[in-house]
Amino acid sequence: MHMKFSFLPKVLLCLGLSGVFAVAQETVESVRRQIKTVEAETAREKSMHEAEKKRHAEFVEVGRKKVQNLSAQNKSLKAEIDSLKVELKKISAARSKTNGSIRYFENRKTKYADSLATVIDSLVPFFESDFPYRTDEAVKNILEIASMLHKGLIETDDALNRTMEVFYDRIRLGYTTEVWKGFLQVDARNVAGTYLRYGAVASIFVSNDGNDVLFLTRNGLGYSWKNVSEDLTMRTVLKDVMKVAEGKTAPRLVTIPVSFPKEAN
């Protein structure tokens, strides 16, 4: 009985020690795993920290370069603005000077236009006393040119060109001859007949019935028609001139009366 009771405690003791050893062994492995886990986590955290630190350094460097670039651009922009301000002052001064010159020349231009319009207008009596052929048209054109120039509707060069064109039209009369039908006031009678204009120096009128024959004469007051119906010789000469001009007879040399003012003799 003694041996039986002494064996049981030993067995229980061994089992208890074995259980303690197993628990202890499991605890060490667990601790080791935890240590490894912590070490891995620490390494990962350290790696992330290093990467973050590197990114931060790169960010700081990029920011620093941007600040440097912005500073350089700011200096360049400020210098350009200062240069533009100086240039703007020069332009403003030049513009003020130019505006002053423009106003000066505009005033001169206006005065010149008024003076030229006055001169053109003063040509009216000259055209009114010119050879009596389309003089009313020439006078009308001259008055219109002067009026438009006074009102600023045309420029001075245009006014000059138009005035010269009126002169040229009058000058061209000297190189042309014309025959046309019309009426002439003779002794309070409105007589129908034929006109002959030779240049701007002579003009003849013969009535349709041949009874009235006149030619244009010039005196100090202007032009007037001289009736030669009673002068048989002159009457015959002028009728022959008209026949040649109208082509009613063979071409030949004829005599055309030309009158000059007395003061030109």
Image (spheres, helix red, strand yellow):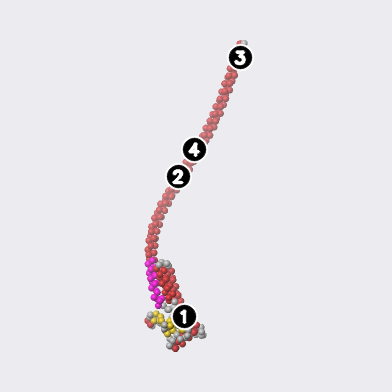
* Residue receiving disc 1: 182
Kind of residue at badge 3: Phe
* Residue 235 spot, x, y in % from top left: 45, 87
Label 1 or label 2, whichever lies nearer to me, is 1
Observer-nearest residue: 69 or 18? 18
Pointer 2 and pointer 4: residues touching (CB < 8 Å)? no
Residue 118 appears left or right of 11 = left
Label 3 or label 4, whichever lies nearer to me, is 3
67 above or below 174?
above
* Residue receiving disc 2: 67
Pointer 2 and pointer 3: residues touching (CB < 8 Å)? no
- The mark nearer the N terminus, 3 or 4, is 3
* Label 1, label 3: how far apart the Cα atoms are: 176 Å
* Label 3, label 4: how far apart the Cα atoms are: 68 Å
Kind of residue at badge 2: Val
SS under mark 1: strand
SS assignment for the magenta stretch, majority: helix
Q: Is residue 34 visible?
A: yes
Q: Which residues make up the magenta segment?
A: 110-129
* Residue receiving disc 4: 53
Determine crowd level at label 3: few under 14, some 14-19, many 20+ residues with C-alpha closer than 10 A: few
- The mark nearer the N terminus, 4 or 1, is 4
Residue 22 appears left or right of 184 = right
* Residue 250 spot, x, y in % from top left: 51, 85
